[in-house]
Amino acid sequence: MPLIQQWELRAAFARRLSTMYGSEVPAYNTLVDISQSVNDDVISEMGSAAERLGSSDRVTAERHGAIRVGTPDEMAQVARIFGAMGMFPVGFYDLREAAVSSVPVVSTAFRPIDSTELARNPFRVFTSMLVPSDRRFFTADLQQRLESFLRRRSLFDPALLVLADRAEKYCGLDESDAEAFLTLATRAFELSTEAVDRAWYEELEEVSSVAADIGGVSSTHINHLTPRVLDIDALYHRMQLRGIEMIDTIQGPPRWKGPDLLLRQTSFRALAEPRVFREPDGTVVEDALRVRFGEVEARGIAATPRGREVYDRLVGEVEDKVRQAGTNGAASATERTAIAASVWNRTVPASEYGLALHDLAYFTFTPTRRVADGSKPGGSLSDLIEQGWLTPEPIVYEDFLPKSAAGIFQSNLTSEGRRDLSATKADNIDAPWLAGALHRQLHDPYELYSGIRRASLASSALQLGLPTISELPAAPTTGVTP
Ligand code: OOG
Ligand code: NI
């Protein structure tokens, strides 16, 4: 029997989740339709330039999902299921710190990591894990009851995990195993029809809606599935015209005169979905919960550590200016957009060439100049770019932004939750800790991007007849300082 390869499992799983989520949350289908029509318009207007950050096939199929689990063991099981599909944990996000509201989770993203696999299908899943031991959110008593509730549940069919390990070991599955794996994996993320214990759910909800969504029920579900759009401002506008209530802002960098950088995201507000509850007196009633929403995103070029510092600095600068501009409180969304664009236009080089020259974003390189006039290539990467020896091609940002993720979580919470501000972070839950819990290497996003850049520089060096090309800028760049 032919082997269904891991990337085929990944692509098929993304399609099945999309069908399943669309049947559960029909507004998601509207979002996908509008995204598609925006993308068609951008491609017909801009032609091949629209495909600078990914082919139209890749962008059309591209999704990210978000899931939430309760324990390190559940997280490790998730890692096996995604490992089956060639998706590896990348990055550590501490939403406990990044969010203003009560979001007691830490997260990573499972995704393919090498260029070939990303080009085949870049499906990624933002995966969050509850931290019941964090005293800023949970008392010792609640922690103990929450952990024992979580210990008693099992999110994944043992048969699914067996198939997952098989797929990882053999780099794929035969057809019948693939079918079983995809069926079980998709089913694991369906919304359960089981009755929710009202008192337990509400007790957790007082602390955090996210805690209730994770630990208040005995199964997990996909929280959202996010299509990629080439013009997020156009999409935002079209959704509003359709009467869909959007959150106030587009998270991430503003629309400005330069190329898309990092990630811009927005969402429509969580919709009421019917759920069954068991009341304290034992009666079972139908009610509704608002937890799942629809998100959409525009992906840009991956920023280097230096570019990221500039980004973070500009976020702060824009916030300060917005505060100053607000007459009674904060400035309007329109004012904010204008302020952000002017700060960016003033500070950041507005071309791929400028971003590469100042080492603000990641690129691969193609040798473009011929040795005709006797001149010889040499010097730093910046020199080679400036003298036209190398032409940059952007590397797409495949990860997430903690501030945007916090904003996405927050904008869809029914309440702020409760947090003990006198308590401080008292644990060692960080990237190395998470790697231990996952029993796998936790990849550093910067190392992955710079690995792709280094490989391209090595091949460029060979073609230009240079011993090596260092990816580090030779001297501090002028103008743009983090
Ligand atoms: C995850 C929120 C973060 C993103 O795209 O930044 C996120 C969640 O709500 O579970 O999905
Ligand atoms: Ni998301």
Image: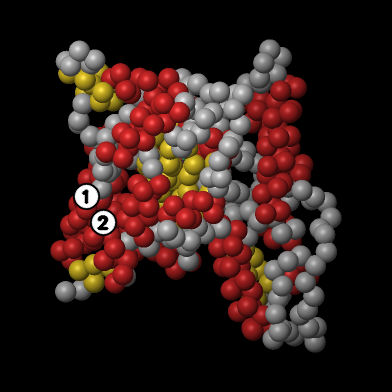
Relative to the observer, which residue lies in front, 188 or 462? 188
Find disc 2 in the rendering and name its residue.
Answer: 161
Residue type (three-letter) at the residue carrying disc 1: Asp
| Residue 324 located left or right of residue 25 | right
In the visual, does 24 lie left or right of 128?
left
The residue that appears at 68% across and 83% down in the rendered structure is 464
User: To which residue does mark 1 refer?
Assistant: 157
Query: Can you say whether 464 is above or below 156 in the image?
Result: below
Q: Note whether 167 is above or below 89 in the view shown.
A: below
Residue 395 seen from this side? no
Q: Amino acid at mark 2?
A: Leu
Out of 143 and 287, give the one closest to the viewer.
Answer: 143
Under circle 2, the secondary element is helix
Residue 124 sits above or below residue 198 on the image: below
Asked which secondary structure carries label 1, the reply is: loop
Q: Position of residue 206 (x, y in %)?
A: 43, 20
Query: How many residues crowd mark 2 within 10 Å: few (<14), some (14–19), many (20+)?
Result: some
Using the rendered view, name the quadrant where residue 353 is placed. Answer: bottom right
Number of marks in the image?
A: 2
Label 1 CB-ligand 1 distance < 8 A: no
State which quarter of the image contains the N terminus. Answer: bottom left
> In the figure, residue 458 lies in which quadrant?
bottom right
Q: Nearer the viewer, residue 8 or 441?
A: 441
Residue at 54% in and 28% down: 136
User: How far across and how far down the image is residue 466, in percent?
Assistant: 71, 83
Q: Are marks 1 and 2 in contact (CB under 8 Å)?
A: yes
